[in-house]
Image (cartoon, grey):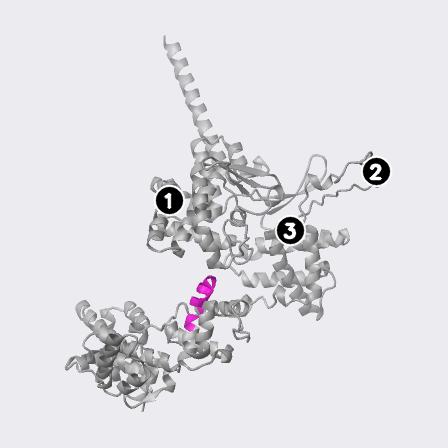
Amino acid sequence: MTQLSHYHARSLIFPSAFPSADSARRARCALRRIYETLEQSPETIATEDIVALYEEAVPIEKRPAKWRDDLIVLRHLEATPVPPSDMAERVWLGTAHLGDAIAASELQPWGSEVQKVVGAIKRLARLQDKAPEHIPAVETTIQNTLTAHSGADFGISIASYRNLRSRILRGVRLVDPSHRSRFSFRSLQGPWRQLTDKARAQEYLRGDFAKLWALITYCWQHDIAPDAVDDEVVSDWRAHLETQLTDTAFETARAAIYSWERMQREVAGWPSQTLSRLYRSPEERRGLFYKDLPEALRDIWEAYVNALSRELAPVRASDCVPDTLEDDPFADLEDGSPECEVDPLRYASTTLRRQRSAWVRCVAAYQELHGSDPDRLSDVTERAVLSEVVRNIEVQNASGDPALHQKSITRKNALQDAIDWAQYDGRERSHIQYLEKMRDRVDPSFKGFERKSNGKTVRKYAHKEMGRRHRERLRQFNNPVHLVNWYRLPDELVAKSRKRLHRTANDPHAINLALIALVHRILRCAPIRAANVAALTVAGPNPQITFPRFTRGKGYLNLEAWQVKNDRDHTVELDEPTMALLRWWLEELRPGLMKRVGAHPENPHLFPAGGMAHRTSTHLSCLFTKTNRSEADFVLNIHLCRHLTAKLILDIDPSKMSLVQHLLGHRKLSTTEAYYAEVNAIIAQREWQRILTLAMNQATLMIKRKTK
C-alpha cells in the first residue's frame, strides 16, 4: 500500500517518466482531485492501484475529457520506480537533503550522466566539509551557496564550473518540491479548509492570509490540526524555514504570528490559543503592553487623555458663547473664575500615543522595582524608575558612537513626558526641577545655561535643523532628471492605474497607484505633514476637503488649529487637476477600497481603513516611498515633500523665507531659517559677491579717472 503523499513525491523524483513536464504537473493535479473528493489528507489515503482509486473516487460526469487525461498520466505515475519510503516522506514534507538528491539521481535513466551528477553533489558536500545528509536540498539555498563560490574553490576552470553547477542543481531539483510544486488553498481539507474559506471571504484579510500561508501549509503537511498549533509547532516551523529561507525566516515567522492574532480577532471560530511573539533579542521585548495593564491603570491613563487631548476637547470660540442671550448675558459668571478656561497643555493624538508607550515602559519598571501598581499617573516619575527606563532604552538603541549612546531624543522625550505627568498631578516644584535636570542630561539639543541681560538664567539649545538623511535625499533633486520625473509622476501613475483597471476591475495595485498620485497632488497644493494627510476627511459633520458647487472649479482643504502642529487654522486652495483626481478617486476607486479593507459605510476618511479608521501615516508613507522608488527611481517620503517644497522656492529666490514659512505652517520665521540655514549662507554669499563686484568696479573706475 502506497500513500498518496508518496505518489506525489514520485511525480517529482521521476520527471523523465512522463511525456512532458506538463504531464507530471497534471499527475499531481489528479492526485489532488482524489483527496479533495475524499476530503482526507494525502498521508491518510493509501492504495495499491492509483488508477482504480481515481476511477472510484472522482466522478466522470463533470469533465469527461480531463477525467480520461488524468487516467493516462496516473498510469505513467504508477509505472515509476518505488523509492525508499523515508526518502519519499522527506520529499513530500520538503525536508530532503543532498543524500536524497544523490539517491534520486542514481534512480534516473540518464546513463553516464548519473555518476557525473552524483560526483558533483559529493564535491559540493566535501567543499562544505559536511556529510550530504546534513545539507538541505533546497534549490534557492544551494544556488546561493554556489554563487558564493567559484571554479577556483573546486580547482576547475570557469567553463567546468558552469557544468558542475548545472549538474548539482539538476540533482537537487529532483527532491525539492518548491521547485515544481505549489500548494493551493483548494488542497486543504477539514478544519484548515473551513478556516481558510472564512478568511478568504473577507477581502481585507487577504494580506494576513498570505503571511500565514507558509505556516498553514506546514501544519497541513505534518497533519497538525488548527487547535494543536502552539509555540512548539511554531519553533519547529521556524527551524524548517531556516533550512530554506535563511535570510527571512525570522521575519516570516514573526509576521505569521501577528497575522494569527488578527485572524483571532476577525474570523469567527479561529483557534483561540495564544502564540508567543518573536523578538530578535531579550532586550527587544518590551515585556508589557497597554492592553495587558489592569483596568484601574487604564482608567488613569484614559482620564489623562480625556483631559489633555486636542481631538477629544478642542477649544473653540463658540464654546464660550451662551446658547441664548438674556437681559444680562454675564449674570451666571462667578467672580474670579472665567467660564471658559483654556488649558495650554493639549496634545495631538500622535503625541499621546507616544506618551502612552513611554508610560507603559515606566509602569513595567515600577512593577519590577516595587512589586505593585502605581496609584496615580506621576508615581512612575521617581528617579529609580526613570533610571531603569533610560537604561532599557540605551540597551535597545545601542550604537557604536559614544555620543549617540549617551544622548538621544528617545530618552529626552521619555523624561519630558515624565515632567508633563508630574505637572498634571500637581507634584511639588522641587520634584519637577529635578526631572528637568534629568532631561537636560540626556537632551541632545541642550547646550547649557546662559545669563540674559536682565540677570535671568535660561537654557540654551542648539538650533533645529534638517536631519542628515533628509539632506542627503534632498540632494538627489539637484539632478534635473529626478526633478522632471517628480513633476510628471502623478500623471504617469494615473495613466498606469487606468490601464490596469481597464484589464482588471478593482486591481489592488492600480488602486494604490491612484492613491499615491492623489497624495502627490495634494502635497503640491498643501505640503502638510504625513499624519494630516493620512487623516483627511471628505465626509462627516466637518469634512476637511470641500468641493466647488459645480463640476469644474477649485476646492479647499481646511485644517483647524487643533489638528495641526502650530495651533493655527490652515486653509489651502486645491487646483482643478487635484479636484478632478479626487472625484475619480471618490466615485470609482474608494468604494472598492472600502469593501476590500472592511471599512464602515459611513467612514469619512479619504484613505479609509477597517471600520471607521484611516490608513496610518506610517503605512501611507511607506507605500508612498516604495512607489516613488519603483516608478520614478528616487527616494521621497511624505515628510521630505515639505523640504522639497522649500528647496524649489529657495533655489529660485533665497529671500522667500516668509513664503516657505507660510506654506509649511511654521509658527516662527526663525524655525524656517534654522531648518534651511544653508540657504541663509547662500544668501550671504551672493550678497557678498555682489558687494565685492561693486567694490571692484568702483576701484577700477577711480583708477581710470586718476590716469586721465
Q: Residue beneath label 3, please?
A: 440
Q: Is residue 203 magenta?
A: yes
Find numbered disc 1 in the image and state the secondary structure of the residue it sits on: helix
Q: Main secondary structure of the magenta part?
A: helix
Which residues are drawn in magenta? 200-214
Disc 2 residue type (three-letter)? Ala
Classed neighbour count for the residue bearing mark 1: other residues with Cα under 10 Å, few (<14), some (14–19), many (≥20): some
Q: Which residue is mark 1?
A: 489
- Dot 3 crowding, Cα within 10 Å, few <14, some 14–19, many 20+: some
Residue 646 percent location from the top left of the image: 47, 38
The quarter of the rendered structure image containing the N terminus is bottom left
Q: Nearer the viewer, mark 1 or mark 2?
A: 2
Q: Amino acid at mark 3?
A: Asp
Left or right: 308 as drawn, with respect to 183: right
Please, what secondary structure does the residue beneath circle 3 have? helix
Residue 220: name its quadrant.
bottom left
Q: How many marks?
A: 3
The one nearer the camera, 280 or 315, is: 315
Q: Which residue is depicted at the point 57% across and 61% down? A: 394
Q: How far apart in space, not on screen, are marks 3 and 2 (Cα)?
A: 48 Å
On screen, residue 327 above or below 243: above
Mark toward the viewer: 1 or 3:
1
Q: Please provide percent x and percent y for residue 218.
A: 41, 77
Determine which residue is flagged by label 2: 331
- Evaluate whether residue 471 shows in this view: no
Q: Secondary structure at mark 2?
A: loop
Q: Position of residue 118 (x, y in %)?
A: 22, 81
Q: Nearer the viewer, residue 87 or 116?
A: 87
